[in-house]
Image (spheres, rainbow, N blue to C red):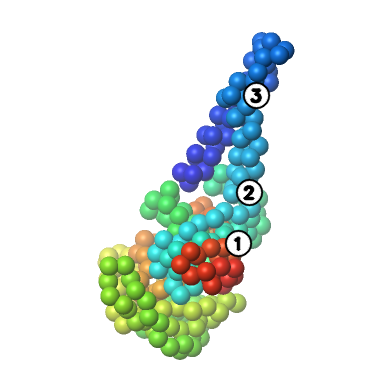
């Protein structure tokens, strides 16, 4: 969000200088006078900034994955692309949708503004759609009365920053039309008494409110998600992640589609 504000500010400044020169300053200069450097830069940068702003706001935006909460689907250090058109076009910064296209589907990997602090962007997987009834017992998801199918893939070993090597169980989960891998650890997360995670741990069925989504990380026991801070409002949606375009540590991941 801060970058979008910065882009708008630079766009406004360069556009104003260009317009001011075209309407007033140019007429006051001698015919053979050189164009001021500031005006030259403004005229050069304005079209480029406008194009970048348009692409990032309405078509595609790059993000970097900062943590392991979406392992094994996404790793810390992955640079991804997010489709900004999928969930409808939105007014930059305000994020109000002005053109409907599609709604998030169960199983989508989506980016959104973090509900407790909207200036921060988060990435998780859509688990619950508006109106869905969700249970999460024995580390298994039940959606609208249907227990999701999972297949044991084996062990998954990784290193968490500041800790020793960890081993989790890897399962393949069928979530809607999407088959993806998740990680499960033996420990149980601790949640505040009023958090969704605590309610789910008590075998309470959660109903996703209208206009909201339930988000979880694929690294189920090492993810700050809806179980901690609540549902994702439609207003906070940014776009759908679809492509890994760079990872400097693991180049084999470059070009992988995100499912």
Q: Secondary structure at mark 1?
A: loop
Q: Nearer the viewer, residue 41 or 93?
A: 41
| Occupied quadrant, residue 169 | bottom left
Which residue in the protein does label 1 denote?
103
Q: Along the polypeptide, which appears first: circle 1 or circle 3?
A: 3
| Occupied quadrant, residue 221 | bottom left
Q: Nearer the viewer, residue 167 or 223?
A: 167
The residue under the point 48% across, 64% down is 248
Residue 135 in the figure: left or right of residue 13: left
| Occupied quadrant, residue 257 | bottom right
Neighbor class of circle 1 (other Cα within 10 Å; few <14, some 14-19, many 20+) is few
Taking 203 as reference, is 233 above or below it?
above
Which residue in the protein does label 2 denote?
55
Mark 1 or 3: in front is: 3
Q: Nearer the viewer, residue 254 or 190?
A: 254
Mark 2 or 1: in front is: 2
Cα distance in 3D space between marks 2 and 1: 21 Å
Q: Position of residue 63 (x, y in %)?
A: 50, 57
Q: Position of residue 43 (x, y in %)?
A: 64, 30
The residue under the point 71% across, 14% down is 32
Q: Along the polypeptide, which appears first: circle 3 or circle 2?
A: 3
Cα distance in 3D space between marks 1 and 3: 39 Å
């Amino acid at each position: 969000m801060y970058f979008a504000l910065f882009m708008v500010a630079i766009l406004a400044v360069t556009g104003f200088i260009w317009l001011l020169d075209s309407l007033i300053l140019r007429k006051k200069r001698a015919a053979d006078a050189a164009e001021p450097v500031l005006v030259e830069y403004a005229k050069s940068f304005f079209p480029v900034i406008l194009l970048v702003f348009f692409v990032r706001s309405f078509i595609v935006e790059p993000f970097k994955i900062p943590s392991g909460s979406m392992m094994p689907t996404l790793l810390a250090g992955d640079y991804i692309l997010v489709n900004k058109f999928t969930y409808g076009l939105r007014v930059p910064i305000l994020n109000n949708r002005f053109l409907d296209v599609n709604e998030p589907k169960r199983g989508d990997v989506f980016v959104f503004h973090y509900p407790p602090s909207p200036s921060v962007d988060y990435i998780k997987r859509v688990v619950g759609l508006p109106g869905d009834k969700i249970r999460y017992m024995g580390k298994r998801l039940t959606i609208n009365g249907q227990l999701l199918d999972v297949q044991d893939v084996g062990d998954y070993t990784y290193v968490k920053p500041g800790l020793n090597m960890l081993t989790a169980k890897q399962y393949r989960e069928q979530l809607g039309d999407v088959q993806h891998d998740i990680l499960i650890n033996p420990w149980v997360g601790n949640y505040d008494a009023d958090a969704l995670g605590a309610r789910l741990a008590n075998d309470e069925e959660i109903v996703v409110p209208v206009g909201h989504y339930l988000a979880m990380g694929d690294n189920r026991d090492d993810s700050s998600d809806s179980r901690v801070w609540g549902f994702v409002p439609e207003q906070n949606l940014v776009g759908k992640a679809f492509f890994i375009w760079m990872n400097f540590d693991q180049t084999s991941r470059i070009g992988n589609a995100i499912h």
